[in-house]
Image (cartoon, helix red, strand yellow):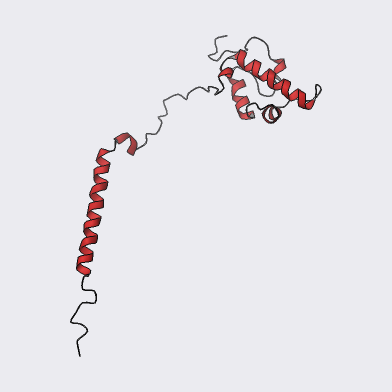
Amino acid sequence: MAEHGSQPMFPEIDKLLELERLRLERERLKLQRKALRRPKSKTAPQAPTQHEPRKAYRPQNKAHRTYDGLRTSYLDYERAVREVVGQDGEVKHEAVYADAGGPSPKTQRREMASYGLDFDRDWPPSKWSKQAPVSRNGTN
């Protein structure tokens, strides 16, 4: 009868371990080479410094980048809402967004603030003057 301890349970285990060690070493070297090729700016994102001023809000809609364009668009939105609610109905910020396809109330607030208009007090747009109350850079 043969002895059970005389032969290893897995005769090729040493070869398998050596192959796995070589595979891991190859993977480590590949990642090391990849890190050398990668520019340093991508590896560590730079946090914005506290000294940099924030960019001023700029409307995505190009017509809203001037007071005249903003006023004209909002008057059109008001007319479209009045068709839905009637001439005596109340034009609300949410109605401009939902019924007239205008910007969201948050965007309306930002756009109005950039021209010195108060979100609640200076509503509806038919109350706006033809001349901008404050220019974007505060010169008038």
Q: Residue furthest bottom?
A: 1
* Quadrant showing the N terminus: bottom left
Question: Which quarter of the rendered picture does the C terminus lie within?
Answer: top right
| Residue under the image location 72 percent in, 15 percent down | 127
- Residue 95: x %, y % from top left: 71, 29
- Depth check: give the residue in front, 63 or 128: 63
Q: Nearer the viewer, residue 133 or 3?
A: 3
**Badge count:** 0
Q: Residue at the location (24% across, 77% down)?
A: 9
**Residue beneath the point at 63% across and 25% down:** 108
Question: In the image, is 33 to the left or to the right of 94?
Answer: left
Q: Residue furthest left?
A: 6
Q: Position of residue 117 (x, y in %)?
A: 64, 18
Q: Is residue 94 left or right of residue 137?
A: right
Percent of width and height locating residue 71: 65, 16
Residue 64 is drawn in which quadrant? Answer: top right
- Measured as percent of width and height from the top left, residue 60 is found at 54, 24
Seen in the image, is 100 located left or right of residue 52?
A: right
Image height of 117 relative to 106, above or below: above
Residue 34's place in the image compared with 138, above or below, is below
Residue at point 73%, 25% (across, down): 81
Position of 4 with respect to 138 (left or right) is: left
Q: Nearer the viewer, residue 12 or 73?
A: 12
Which quadrant would residue 7 be assigned to in this image? bottom left
Viewer-closest of 134 and 63: 63
Tell which residue pokes out farthest to the right in this image. Answer: 88
Picture quarter containing residue 78? Answer: top right
